[in-house]
Image: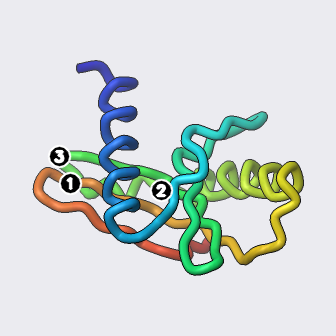
Amino acid sequence: MNTFNKGRAAESKAADFLESKGFKIIEKNFYCKGGEIDIIAFKNDTFHFVEVKSGRDFEPVYNITPQKIKRITKCLFRYVQKNKITSAYCISAVIIKENSIEIIENLTL
């Protein structure tokens, strides 16, 4: 499986995980100039702009860099403006390792 297909498989697994935790998936792969948001989900009156990271031989969370958060933030603001979002929102991450999956909510720099 190539890197693109591995990423899409991880995003699908993350979406299923989020739904099992009560999140409603609003959109997947929202693209904007300079970036992408893997999953946009909604729970408890809050939009979650979710970055999905997976890996086997390393800690995937370390791939969420300050530059990555800045790109997500740019897309987040475009999405909020475009869709006239007035609810609360945050950046979250779903981390997938070989035998575990977890969500980290409200990432900041």
Q: Position of residue 67 (x, y in %)?
A: 62, 52
Q: Tell me whether circle 2 and circle 1 mark residues in contact (CB < 8 Å).
A: no
Image quarter of residue 47: bottom right
Image quarter of residue 81: bottom right
- Amino acid on which the number 3 mark rests in the picture: Arg
- Mark number for residue 97? 1
> Is 10 or 54 nearer to us in this picture?
10
Scheme by which the image is coloured: rainbow
In this view, the residue farthest toward the top is: 2
Question: Real-space Cα distance between discs 2 and 1?
Answer: 15 Å
**Measuring 39% from the left and 60% from the top, which residue is drawn there?**
19
Q: Tell me whether circle 1 and circle 3 mark residues in contact (CB < 8 Å).
A: yes
In this rendering, position of residue 17 left or right of residue 108: left
Query: Is the residue marked by circle 1 packed among few (<14), some (14-19), or many (20+) residues within 10 Å?
Result: some
Q: Which residue is mark 2?
A: 64
> Is 11 or 44 nearer to us in this picture?
44
> Is 62 or 48 nearer to us in this picture?
48
Query: Is 66 drawn above or below residue 82 in the view shown?
Result: below
Mark 2 or mark 1, which has the lower sequence index? 2
Q: Which residue is mark 3?
A: 56
Q: Position of residue 13 (x, y in %)?
A: 30, 46
Q: Position of residue 48 (x, y in %)?
A: 58, 65
- Amino acid on which the number 1 mark rests in the picture: Lys
Question: Real-space Cα distance between discs 1 and 3?
Answer: 6 Å
Mark 1 or mark 3, which has the lower sequence index? 3
